[in-house]
Image (cartoon, helix red, strand yellow):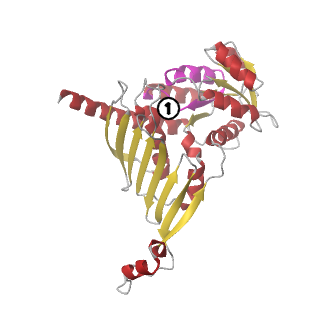
Amino acid sequence: MRADGALRPGDDPVFGVVGVGSLGRHHARILADLPGALLAGVFDLDPDRAAAVAGEHGTRAFAGLPALLDAVDAVVVATPTSSHEEVALAALVGGVHVFVEKPIAPSLEAADRILDAAERADRVVQIGHVERFNGALRAAREYLDTPLFIESHRLAPFVPRSTDVAVVLDLMIHDVDLVRALVERPIHSIAATGVPVITPTVDIANARLEFEGGAVANLTASRVSLERMRKLRVFQRSGYLSLDLAAGRGEFLRLRETLPAFGGQDVDLAALLDAGGYETLIERIPIEGDGAEPLYKELESFRDAVAGTAPPAVSGQDGRDALAVTLEIEKLIQAHVADTRSA
């Protein structure tokens, strides 16, 4: 890389991974084999874990963060949220492009410091909202047309991970980012409720977001469910999208184009249904993802942003905006919980 941060023509960007726990090890796995990218190594506060991951992928375990940053053009920050700011700022000050796993930071003030540092250093910051790269969602893009009502359910069984933060920052933030990207309008009101069930923080939550222009999103997230579910339903004038984000597939339902206008007096809906059933009225279009791993597609996009061939798919500002909405949801829920405890 040149001193100004630009890659030399023909050079592949060199990457490192900071934090190789449950998610960071997958970043290392993908970067080790990603075309157009070179993995220089990994760093983790647990040197044994770093050595194990480095050994699996034929790369180097660095003894310290400064040494890793000196060897790379870009870094993936997959550490606990509490350390995102510290690691990202060290990288940006060193002239290194940064990918930060969601949420961008634990507070808006920390997020703003990351964005300010990126602007001063003229470096890319991309945020790891991986659901943007879900195969079902990518395949459904051609059918999306001004969503009016969105419903999401993100449910998971309890596991003793990320329990230091409420389910809103742990899980719901994925869907906050998705619905903001789908509606593309400012949010003008938020209502939310939630309760702690197993942990001291909120374990199940629901939020209703109302957007300028009339669109509404209803989001439910739980980490105390008996089943796993990641479903997104989008209602719009042109039809209805039902997506299973976990399976990477879904369907688009719309009125058949051959039907006469419903406003006419000569349309006998009962007769149409009797003649051919529901399928007489509704066309069902299967949606299948391409099977690509969403994290792989996400890191492809970061590689391209670092190489200067595309803007970051999820910018630092996108991550900051999702965090702002999520923190407001959490604030409303905490007020609700306090009210129920004092009753």
Q: Residue at x 49, y 61 (%)?
A: 145
Q: Is residue 104 magenta?
A: yes
| Residue 318, x across and y down, in percent | 51, 39
Name of the residue lying farthest toward the right: 10
Q: Which residue is mark 1?
A: 103
Q: Secondary structure at mark 1?
A: loop
The vertical placement of 112 against 183, above or below, is above
Name the spot of residue 315 as percent of width and height, x first: 56, 38
Q: Quadrant of the N terminus?
A: top right
Q: Is residue 13 visible?
A: no
Q: Relative to residue 126, is residue 164 depicted above or below?
A: above
Which residue is nearer to you in this view: 109 or 339?
Answer: 339
> Magenta span covers which residues?
81-108
The image shows residue 17 at horizontal and vertical percentages of 66, 25
Q: Is residue 236 visible?
A: yes
| Kind of residue indicated by mark 1 | Pro
Residue 231 locus on image (x, y percent): 48, 48
Q: Is residue 300 magenta?
A: no
